[in-house]
């Protein structure tokens, strides 16, 4: 049911329209009706956003929901609740579900489950190859017809470069975005940490930065050859930033994102044998982190994602190399964005653009802006509110985060999706 909502006295930041001002925002019939020009109405729901920031709902390019197939780690219902609490109103689901998103039937199942959970804006990424095995191409056109906005092989390797070339040609024919996580499997092997001093000190199998940059270089060459739209997912090292910068300079259709934890943590932060720091790509060096931050500031990196991967307790028990990689990171996405703005001199509006309008543009979504007439996806947050990451505040089924029991600043108070309030802090238990 459509609602008439007036958000009053908030600091409205809309990077897409270069707006940063105090005012009111009016929502009618699921759309943005007006900015700075509100009139009272007897049937309107009023939200007081004094001392809070009102921005477009966040668009997350990589969120594992663990359903179908891994519901002991999380479900569409549990993880979309966490997304709503994080101010995320649109999210992409990578294809490495069980079964993988390699048929229209699986994509339709996910769409139905998301609607049942009251969070319909889950966008499936189709599997590039059958069962993500890296050998046979999927029917990419059928996946596009089923609503997949892009195709990817997730973290799984392709058997050879010819398969990647054919996939890019096929995708280009149907104007499908190819999302690629650059990793040369023969170099990364079963590594779990960056090839450097920390891995050497603890005797951990390592992954060189070259495993990413070599695979990226090959992929960029094929993108130029085939003319496909290419998005590089979760880059982590200096060489990748340089290569993407060069590719853009010479006119290649390429975009890139980085996971938020890569902008904060390095190999130096790893606590010995704490598997919450086990991520892929691994946490790298201080120099790599600085290049990632600089790439974000200068526009080389287009978007920031959570790379949310909830796990059950068993997945993170055991020796570090034997644990499963990934961080549950939805609810830390916005606080870490604020921390980046405050501590590292990147304008908040620029960072919010990397979480809203830029990822929406990559996917071609009607999202990421507060333009009158656009879909009313909105995040309202208190930038000064402090909260602790603990079992009372955490909504994801996975508690695998290096920020557990840390105090963070910045908390979402309301999230609206298509003009409907899907999260309100005051109504939480």
Image (cartoon, rainbow, N blue to C red):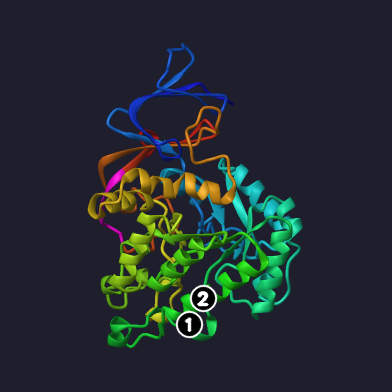
- Image spot of residue 21 (x, y percent): 33, 30
Q: Secondary structure at mark 1?
A: helix
Q: Say above or below: 114 vs 291.
A: above
Residue at 27% of width from left, 57% of height from top? 405
Residue under label 2, please give it.
183
Residue at 26% of width from left, 41% of height from top? 385
Residue at 43% of width from left, 12% of height from top? 40
- Sequence-wise first label, 1 or 2: 2
- Image spot of residue 320 (x, y percent): 38, 79
Residue under label 1, please give it.
188
Q: Say above or below: 171 vs 280.
A: above
Q: Please say whether residue 405 is one of the residues in the magenta stretch.
A: yes
Q: Say above or below: 343 vs 187.
A: above
- Image spot of residue 140 (x, y percent): 73, 61
Q: Please say whether residue 99 is one of the residues in the magenta stretch.
A: no
Asked if the residue under mark 2 is in contact with the one under mark 1, i.e. CB atoms within 8 Å, the reply is yes
Compared across the picture, whether 263 is left or right of 373 comes to left
Q: Camera-side residue: 276 or 381? A: 381
Using a 10 Å C-alpha cutoff, classify the residue at mark 1 as few (fewer than 14 neighbours), some (14 to 19) or many (20 or more): many
Compared across the picture, whether 188 is left or right of 164 comes to left
- Stretch in magenta: 403-410
What distance separates the C-alpha of mark 1 from that of mark 2?
A: 7 Å
Q: Camera-side residue: 397 or 53? A: 53
Using a 10 Å C-alpha cutoff, classify the residue at mark 2 as few (fewer than 14 neighbours), some (14 to 19) or many (20 or more): many
The circle drawn on residue 268 is none
């Amino acid at each position: 049911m459509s609602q008439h909502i007036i958000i009053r006295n908030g600091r409205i930041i809309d990077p897409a329209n270069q707006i940063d001002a105090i005012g009111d925002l009016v929502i009618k019939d699921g759309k943005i009706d007006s900015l700075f020009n509100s009139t009272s109405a007897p049937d309107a729901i009023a939200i007081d956003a004094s001392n809070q920031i009102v921005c477009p709902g966040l668009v997350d390019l990589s969120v594992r929901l663990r359903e179908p197939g891994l519901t002991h780690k999380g479900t569409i219902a549990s993880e979309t609740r966490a997304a709503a609490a994080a101010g995320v109103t649109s999210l992409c689901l990578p294809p490495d579900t069980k079964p993988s998103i390699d048929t229209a039937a699986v994509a339709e199942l996910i769409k139905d489950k998301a609607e049942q959970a009251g969070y319909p804006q889950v966008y499936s990424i189709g599997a590039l190859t059958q069962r993500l095995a890296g050998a046979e191409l999927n029917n990419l056109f059928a996946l596009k017809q089923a609503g997949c906005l892009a195709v990817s092989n997730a973290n799984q390797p392709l058997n050879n470069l010819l398969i990647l070339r054919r996939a890019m040609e096929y995708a280009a024919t149907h104007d499908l975005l190819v999302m690629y996580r650059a990793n040369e499997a023969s170099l990364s092997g079963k590594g779990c940490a960056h090839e450097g001093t920390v891995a050497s000190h603890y005797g951990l199998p390592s992954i060189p930065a070259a495993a990413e940059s070599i695979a990226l270089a090959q992929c960029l060459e094929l993108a130029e050859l085939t003319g496909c739209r290419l998005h590089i997912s979760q880059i982590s090292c200096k060489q990748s930033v340089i290569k993407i910068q060069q590719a853009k300079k010479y006119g290649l259709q390429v975009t890139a994102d980085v996971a938020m934890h890569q902008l904060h943590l390095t190999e130096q932060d790893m606590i010995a044998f704490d598997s919450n720091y086990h991520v892929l790509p691994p946490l790298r060096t201080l120099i790599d982190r600085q290049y990632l931050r600089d790439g974000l500031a200068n526009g080389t990196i287009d978007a920031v994602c959570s790379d949310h991967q909830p796990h059950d307790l068993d997945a993170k028990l055991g020796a570090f190399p034997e644990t499963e990689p990934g961080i549950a990171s939805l609810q830390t996405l916005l606080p870490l964005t604020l921390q980046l703005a405050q501590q590292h001199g990147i304008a908040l509006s620029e960072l919010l653009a990397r979480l809203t309008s830029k990822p929406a543009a990559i996917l071609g979504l009607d999202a990421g802006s507060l333009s009158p007439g656009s879909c009313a996806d909105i995040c309202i947050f208190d930038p000064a509110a402090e909260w602790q990451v603990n079992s009372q505040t955490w909504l994801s089924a996975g508690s695998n985060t290096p920020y557990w029991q840390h105090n963070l600043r910045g908390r979402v108070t309301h999230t609206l999706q298509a003009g409907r309030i899907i999260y309100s802090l005051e109504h939480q238990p």
